Image: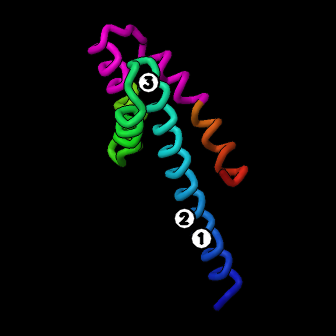
Amino acid sequence: MTTFDKREEGFEAKFAHDEELRFLALARRNKLLGAWAAKLLGLPEAQAEAYATQLAAPDLIASDERLAIKVVADLKAKGIARQPQEVLATMKNLLARAIGDIEAGH
């Protein structure tokens, strides 16, 4: 195996690791967002946990806009007005928190 091959394998391993961490951070962010929205919705604990888990579904992890639209619609259905930009800003803050939690080993 050449040095180039070893280097390429190293880059591939780092990429795979980074993608896994990214997915974990987004899933954690979505669960935190679900807890935030559930609190606004006044959901009891069991329903709040289920809602947060629902938002961590892979199809919602893939699209920030889709997630924000869903949360805005869920809040609107209960008469709670939030703009998509506010939800996206909350998502950004929660992503930073999720990354920090992962880096801290939580």
**Picture coordinates of residue 97, whole percent (x, y):** 64, 36
Nearer to us of marks 2 and 3 is 3
**Mark 1: which secondary structure?**
helix
Q: Is residue 99 above or below residue 77?
A: below
Labels 1 and 3: the sequence-earlier one: 1
Q: Nearer the viewer, residue 51 or 16?
A: 51
Distance from Cα at disc 1 to Cα at disc 3: 36 Å
Q: Report which residue position mark 1 lands on.
A: 13
Circles 1 and 3, Cβ within 8 Å, touching? The answer is no
Q: Going by the image, does 37 lie left or right of 2?
A: left
Q: Nearer the viewer, residue 91 or 15?
A: 91
* Amino acid at the residue labelled 2: Ala
**Mark 2: which secondary structure?**
helix
Q: Is 72 covered by the magenta stretch?
A: yes
Q: Residues within 10 Å of mark 2 (few under 14, many from 20)?
A: few
Distance from Cα at disc 2 to Cα at disc 1: 5 Å
Q: Report which residue position mark 2 lands on.
A: 16
Q: Report which residue position mark 3 lands on.
A: 37
Circles 2 and 3, Cβ within 8 Å, touching? The answer is no
Q: Quadrant of residue 38?
A: top left
Residue at 38%, 19% (x, y): give it: 41
Residue at 71%, 84% (x, y): give it: 3
- The residues colored magenta run 69-93
Residue at 32%, 26% (x, y): give it: 70
